[in-house]
Amino acid sequence: MSVWRKMTKLLGLGGGGSGCHGELCIEGGNRLEKVVIVGSPNVGKSVIFNNLTGAYVTVSNYPGTTVAISRGKARIEGTECEIMDTPGMYSLLPITEEERVARSILLVERPGVVLHVVDGKELERMLPLTLQLIEAGLPVILAVNMMDEAEAVGIDIDVDLLAKELGIPVIATVATTGHGLELLRRKLGERVSS
Ligand SMILES: Nc1nc2c(ncn2[C@@H]2O[C@H](COP(=O)(O)OP(=O)(O)O)[C@@H](O)[C@H]2O)c(=O)[nH]1
Ligand SMILES: [Mg+2]
């Protein structure tokens, strides 16, 4: 049984299916690689989403909910991708409707990459979700954002060591200035084209 089927079953969620929702399919039936951005509120997810996607963005309520989800397209290292910006989530065990939607997206949309964005000033508080995502078998990339503010208060993060310990790509970013976003694109590209 695939990780996806196992997870949807374990968590008692329906769906799964092909993950192909009409407009998400390229002509000819190829599925777009999906990159789903997750993380706590106010860590810079939407700034990174806007940087990756540019102009072609749609916002709609997630089916059956009042939670707004942004979707946009991006060509990353030659691969056409769909990027989804999710509402804030603190944990894979949902409490709010926003968290429930974010978790559903992870389970139903079968992303090629889950981009977890955290605030470099709050790393300890936010890493538990990274671990949950990794343990759930999701293809996680971690962006440690707000590095300008973290450095300003004397926080020094060894992203290479963190990447080694977690076994996933970790990139330090300052979304508002674009610092680290080129490298982030490259790391995303390595994942979606593999
Ligand atoms: N100083 C600083 N501010 C940032 C950075 N990234 C995002 N912000 C700001 O943080 C706020 C929240 O960003 P947003 O993308 O809306 O967060 P989201 O709730 O995770 O989508 C906005 O005012 C951004 O301009 C960063 O790297 N450094
Ligand atoms: Mg946002």
Image: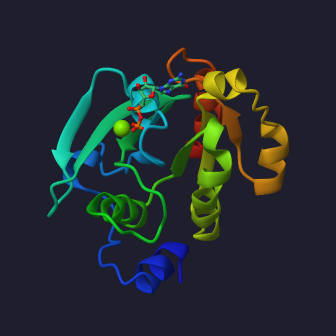
Position of residue 109 relative to residue 43, above or below, is below
Name the residue at 33% across, 62% down: 19
Name the residue at 39% across, 33% down: 46
Query: Residue 89's image quarter?
Result: bottom left
Name the residue at 61% across, 22% down: 182
Q: Please give left or right for residue 149 compared with residue 162 in the image.
A: left
Q: Residue furthest front?
A: 153
Q: Please give left or right for residue 139 compared with residue 40 in the image.
A: right
Colouring rule applied to residues: rainbow
Tally of numbered tags? 0
Q: Position of residue 50 (x, y in %)?
A: 38, 26
Position of residue 76 relative to residue 91, above or below, is above
Query: Residue 174's image quarter?
Result: top right
Name the residue at 61% across, 56% down: 130
Q: Is residue 143 visible in the rendered structure shown here?
A: no
Q: Is residue 122 visible in the rendered structure shown here?
A: yes
Q: Position of residue 47 (x, y in %)?
A: 42, 27
Q: Please give left or right for residue 157 compared with residue 106 in the image.
A: right
Q: Ligand 1 appears in which quadrant?
A: top left
Along the line of sight, the residue nearer the viewer: 80 or 140: 140
Q: Position of residue 74 (x, y in %)?
A: 41, 30
Position of residue 81 relative to residue 4, above or below, is above
Query: Residue 21's image quarter?
Result: bottom left
